Image: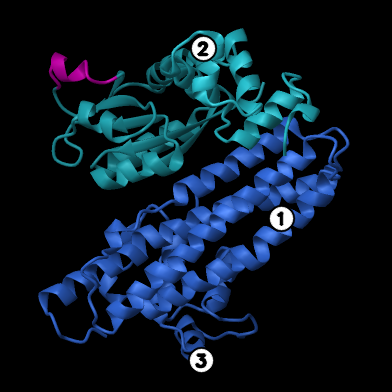
Chain colours: A blue, B cyan
Amino acid sequence: MQTPHYNYTPDDKMITLISDNYRMIQVMSRFGIKVGFGDKTVAEVCEEHNVDCMTFLAVVNFVSNPNDSSTFHLNEISIRSILQYLRSSHIYFLDYLLPEIRRKLLDGIRFRTSDVSILILKFFDEYSFEVRTHMEYEENHVFDYVHRLLDGIADPNFKISTYSDHHEEVTSKLRELKTLIIRYCPESADVNLLNAALFDICQCKQELDSHSKVENMIFIPAIEALETKISSREGCNPQ
Amino acid sequence: MTKQHVNVAIAVSSPIISSGLKMCLMRMTDSIFNVVETSGYRELVDACNMHDIHIIIVNPSFGGIFNPNSFRNEVPHLVRLILIETGPVDEHSRKLYDQSIGVMDDMMTIASKIHKILNTDTENIKSKDLLSLREKEIVSLVVKGMTNKEIADKLFISVHTVITHRRNIARKLEIHSATGLTIYAIVNHLVDISDIRI
């Protein structure tokens, strides 16, 4: 089936976005927008929640058409808003989704120490640890750097391009976990509970993919543009 | 039999030909084609890295002048390149591609050309799927915690050979982690769970 190619504008109704693609609920909540907005337009809802409308739409349009980066302009992106989006995505993955998957996995494989279920859980825990380390690195180093950059302070020892992206690794590990469970899960596993865990893993992979695309295609290019602006006009205060 | 899913990228600058190709692929029924249309060279490389693209249909003027050899070096995995002939192409350039399709080819011809590529690749994968005895031996030593050097000494082979074996094992099983390999080894009775320190 072909996904329709939408390009939303500030005057579209917020409800249309969600009717077209339920995954937009996730994007909204990352920006701090809650459901219950009646028939208001995107611009109205964003204003009410103090969200930069163009940045919100850039992410929405990009998540709807991940292969098309022509739907937004980098100079319309508010870096502070995109930082908020990325930060709440991290919270969602680390504090909600991964613990939730672990809980379902634990029940689904009917955990016991005498078979491979202990190894499946070990794999998952190692994986969660890696994701946490990766995201904490971003929070502590990359985002801090960006905040300083927003205050007009350039760091001669750090460039956004030197920060290498490990997302590919992060999602390929998740694919491996899925393969391991499907191929080698113990016979004693509970089918329904295990399926629930598997669906969550697939969803998590999809969301991590989308998260890393937003970082690679919107966040990093926007920071690169800011870096160029600062280095060419040393001393000026960027907005 | 379940249908094979094939990820295809279309790299053609003409939107008419690009959409036309997409429609043709979607009408083919013996495999399911997931099609990505790309509009620039970088986008094509990114799509290959993100979507595990198997086949790329490209026209020679894509992104200026498309160079199949340098493109193959940019993507980590094996991709099959199909040339879409929108104008005259010389024999030397055609040889750089795995297959070529003409804009006037009928549906049957296009389908058979694509399936020729798919069939060869499926055969290759099938025969490479199972671990050899030597590879199984190496798996059991790896999961017992031995280093490459220790394995090499024990089996009287070079460390380099051990590394090659391990790379092939990872590719065949699609398992790249030590824990994953341990799970494989226990389920296939190459080691006992009591031999493993968790």
Residues tagged 1 and 2 counted as in contact (Cβ below 8 A): no
Q: Which residue is mark 3?
A: A48
Q: Secondary structure at mark 3?
A: helix
Of all chains, the one bearing label 2 is B
The CA distance from mark 1 to mark 3 is 34 Å
- Residue B192: image quadrant is top right
Q: Which residue is at a point 11% across and 74% down the rendered structure image? A: A232
The CA distance from mark 1 to mark 2 is 37 Å
Q: Closer to the camera, B41 or B142?
A: B142
From this view, report whether residue A72 is shown above or below residue B52. Answer: below
Q: Which residue is mark 2?
A: B123
Query: Residue B79: x percent and y percent?
Result: 37, 27
Residue B92 falls within the magenta-colored stretch:
yes
Q: Secondary structure at mark 1?
A: helix
Give the amino acid type for the residue marked by disc 1 in the picture.
Ile
Q: Which residue is mark 1?
A: A101
**Residue A9 is at least partly visible in this image:** no
Q: Residues within 10 Å of mark 1 (few under 14, many from 20)?
A: many
Q: Residues within 10 Å of mark 3 (few under 14, many from 20)?
A: few
Q: Closer to the camera, B7 or A14?
A: B7
In this rendering, position of residue A108 left or right of residue B28: right
> Which residue of the protein is positioned furthest toward the bottom in this rendering?
A48
Q: Looking at the image, is mark 1 or mark 3 nearer the viewer?
A: 1
Q: Which residue is at a point 26% across and 74% down the rendered structure image? A: A75
The CA distance from mark 3 to mark 2 is 59 Å
In this rendering, position of residue B182 left or right of residue B151: right
Of all chains, the one bearing label 1 is A
Give the amino acid type for the residue marked by disc 2 in the picture.
Glu
Residues tagged 1 and 3 counted as in contact (Cβ below 8 A): no
Residues tagged 3 and 2 counted as in contact (Cβ below 8 A): no
